[in-house]
Image: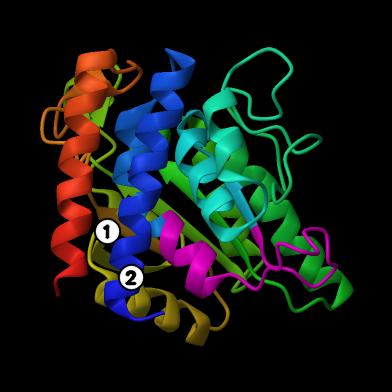
Amino acid sequence: MTKLELQKTANEVRKSIVTAVHSAKSGHPGGSLSAADVFTYLYFEELNIDPKEPKKADRDRFVLSKGHTAPGLYAALAERGFFPKEELTTLRHIGSHLQGHPCMQHTPGLDMSSGSLGQGISAAVGMALSAKTFGDNYRVYTLLGDGELQEGQVWEASMFASAKKLDNLCVIVDNNNLQIDGTIEEVNSPYPIPEKFEAFGFHVINIDGHDFDQLKAAFDEARTIKGQPTAIIMKTVKGKGVSFMENNASWHGTAPNDEQYATAMAELEKAGEALCQK
């Protein structure tokens, strides 16, 4: 995909996020929107995956460690063709395979159930170790929230990944600086994030998580690193793409009402039209 095509696709992913959370009347739009660009890049450029064969043995693995942002992951999976986009409106409904946190038993394209913060990276490390142990060539990616870095298990897993030289592992941190109770500094600061991962033996890349050129350069660089895992630290905007949600902690886990939904969709439609004119 070209950069413009990725931008257009990410805008569609954002529209699907807002639609799904509005339909559920609950969910987590803020962190889903901040990660919409990396979800798009992963599923349309980076990952070796096939929607027609979601369990193929040599596929790359992705673990959403910040599992509450499932609306963003579901939106990207639907856009990529793993299941019909119409199903996004069943988010969090009884009987739907799209639950509030990812469930690998029911949703095509999911490699791990997640939701308890701090645990997803451990699962990803296990997958990467398995690939090394059995000589498999797949790569493993995991997305963490910056507030999630307050969990000790993240650092236990990171220490292990470095000790085992898991260069097939790419840890991505969505550094939007907000969690449910406010800024991450106010709650329990994990800063400085890059230096911490460096101290734990990672190759660290710092980028703007909304810039597709920087996303491409970072993931390309990660593939060249040998003997150590990579951490991509993305500076992002919580609620990116919807003006009244941007940099607002109250949208961490709040669904838009009908009026707010209409406003958000109008903004995203306008953004999409602007991209079509480029």
Residue 50 location in percent, x, y? Answer: 71, 68
> Which of the pair 154/278 is nearer the observer?
278
The residue tagged 1 is: 209
Q: Which mark is residue 215?
A: 2
Residue 238 figure quarter: top left
Q: Is residue 199 above or below residue 229?
A: above
Span colored in magenta:
39-61
Q: Residue at x 29, y 44 (%)?
A: 34
* Amino acid residing under circle 2: Leu
Secondary structure under the numbered disc 1 in the rendered image: loop
Prevailing secondary structure of the magenta residues: loop
Q: Residue at x 20, y 16 (%)?
A: 259
Q: Is residue 44 magenta?
A: yes
In the rendered structure, which amino acid carries the disc numbered 1? Gly
Disc 2 element: helix
Q: Is residue 140 above or below residue 235?
A: below
Task: Give coordinates of residue 133: x percent, y percent.
Answer: 84, 70
